[in-house]
């Protein structure tokens, strides 16, 4: 019913797609809905548009607010998902308020009963297009990096080939449904407010909305009067390289066919990115841990440091400038070794966070320790204070730091630091910031 002439927004309450109004997915999170609402509210705020567009903007502003009112409330959203706007008729959240009843009764029914065939999409009517099928599809980071074609067989309902979806034997014409007089829909009367009645259209159950019925003895042998049969079909799902979580891949017209629907809906795959053992992904960039030994950090190396998502080894040479030393928590960037951009040869960057593997306890004996002490920088001159306390120490869990602080301190400072680390442009140069290896955390890297 969308875009039907002569109808105003309120009277078409049944067909309002709140997700469409906010331009979000049906699976959108609360945060995404809030963001979309703010965006819509800002763009259509009546104070922010030229005079001549004010009325239209005001209407958009109102519908965005109404959509947000429902979608931001779990209970209302659940009702809406299950029943559409019908759930809110009569004392709902302001939809349809102030609508002229004559418009509804005259406009809606006058038009509907005449030309049902060409309309559709709305609840309770003969659908013009069968519904889309939404599915999640989990993909590994490797497959998102390289791209992948998945072939699978799917069972779908198709219109019966023997009776072309009529459900009747050859030579028998289905007769008009007496319950709905062939319309496929019935009117039901509903109270929308005190003393106000409206009529709604619901699908006729006697003929399943097709408007036609077939006598039991005249039913098609192949589909047994069901009008559709199951068909196995080979489908191909193409995941382009560089695709990401939330991307939609649409197989057009591959959903189930429904008698009376002139078009067939799509199968829509929503990509879900599986977590990876080695790489973290943020958009086009990848992040991993670079583990080096203490000797390598101090004296350098030239070797394959990581196996990339396509199986290639990535080799690095350190130092790049004579005498350069690698430090724990240092972040280095390997340009062009991130994720590919879709439909492009360009790639993001690979950020490596240095983790230094120190020797095991007891690795050095007295002699080697003495030799090392001579080789390494000498300590600073002793600190001079009036009083010196001999203290003991133990290993600590960094998480415990600040636990006794009633403000719940500590935590946000870490986050700030993390952000600084990620945004810093470090191109194979030493990062001045230092992070403890504890913050870098449990990533393992493949070493060849
Ligand atoms: Zn009927
Ligand atoms: Zn059939």
Image (spheres, grey):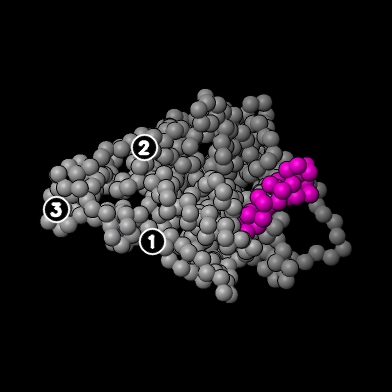
Earlier sequence position, callout 2 versus callout 3: 3
Location of mark 3 (residue): 218
Image side of residue 331 versus residue 341, left or right:
right
Residue at the location (52% across, 34% down)?
Answer: 339
Image side of residue 361 versus residue 124, left or right:
right
- Mark 2 and 3 residues: CB-CB less than 8 Å, in contact? no
Q: Nearer the viewer, residue 324 or 221?
A: 221
Main secondary-structure element of the magenta-colored stretch: helix
Residue at the location (57% across, 37% down)?
Answer: 285
Q: Which mark is residue 237?
A: 2
Q: Secondary structure at mark 3?
A: helix
Compared to 429, does 210 lie above or below? below
Q: CA distance from mark 1 to mark 2?
A: 40 Å
Earlier sequence position, callout 3 versus callout 1: 1
- State which quadrant residue 403 falls in: bottom right
Location of mark 1 (residue): 186
Q: CA distance from mark 2 to mark 3?
A: 40 Å
Q: Secondary structure at mark 2?
A: strand
- Mark 3 and 1 residues: CB-CB less than 8 Å, in contact? no
- Tally the marks: 3
Earlier sequence position, callout 1 versus callout 2: 1
Q: Range of the magenta residues?
A: 43-69
């Amino acid at each position: 019913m969308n875009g039907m002439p002569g109808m105003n927004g309120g009277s078409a309450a049944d067909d309002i797609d709140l997700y469409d109004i906010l331009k979000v997915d049906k699976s959108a999170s609360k945060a995404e809905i809030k963001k979309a609402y703010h965006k819509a509210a800002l763009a259509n705020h009546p104070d922010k548009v030229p005079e001549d567009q004010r009325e239209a903007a005001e209407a958009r502003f109102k519908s965005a607010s109404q959509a947000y009112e429902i979608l931001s409330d779990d209970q209302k959203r659940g009702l809406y998902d299950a029943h559409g706007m019908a759930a809110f008729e009569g004392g709902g959240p302001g939809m349809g308020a102030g609508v002229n009843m004559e418009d509804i009764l005259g406009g809606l029914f006058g038009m509907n009963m005449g030309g049902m065939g060409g309309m559709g999409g709305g609840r309770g009517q003969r659908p013009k297009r069968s519904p889309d099928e939404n599915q999640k599809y989990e993909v590994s980071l490797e497959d998102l990096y390289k791209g992948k074609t998945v072939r699978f067989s799917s069972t779908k309902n198709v219109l019966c080939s023997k009776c072309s979806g009529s459900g009747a034997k050859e030579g028998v014409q289905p007769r008009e449904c007496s319950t709905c007089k062939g319309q496929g829909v019935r009117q039901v009367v509903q109270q929308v407010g005190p003393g106000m009645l409206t009529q709604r259209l619901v699908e006729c159950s006697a003929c399943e909305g097709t408007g036609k019925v077939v006598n039991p003895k005249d039913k098609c042998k192949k589909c047994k009067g069901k009008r559709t049969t199951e068909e196995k079909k080979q489908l191909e799902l193409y995941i382009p390289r560089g695709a990401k979580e939330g991307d939609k891949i649409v197989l057009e017209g591959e959903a189930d066919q429904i008698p009376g629907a002139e078009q067939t809906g799509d199968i829509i795959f929503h990509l879900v990115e599986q977590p990876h053992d080695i790489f973290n992904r943020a958009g086009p960039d990848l992040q991993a841990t670079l583990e080096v030994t203490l000797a390598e950090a101090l004296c350098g190396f030239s070797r394959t440091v990581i196996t990339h998502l396509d199986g290639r080894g990535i080799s690095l040479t350190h130092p790049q400038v004579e005498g350069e030393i690698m430090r724990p928590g240092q972040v280095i960037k390997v340009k062009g070794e991130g994720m590919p951009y879709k439909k492009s040869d360009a790639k993001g960057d690979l950020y490596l966070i240095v983790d230094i593997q120190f020797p095991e306890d007891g690795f050095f004996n007295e002699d080697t320790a003495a030799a090392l002490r001579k080789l390494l920088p000498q300590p600073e001159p002793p600190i001079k204070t009036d009083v010196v306390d001999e203290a003991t120490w133990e290993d600590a869990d960094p998480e415990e730091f600040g636990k006794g602080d009633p403000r719940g301190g500590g935590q946000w400072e870490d986050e700030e630091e993390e952000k600084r680390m990620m945004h810093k442009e470090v191109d194979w140069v030493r990062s001045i910031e230092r992070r403890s290896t504890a913050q870098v955390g449990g990533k393992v890297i493949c070493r060849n």
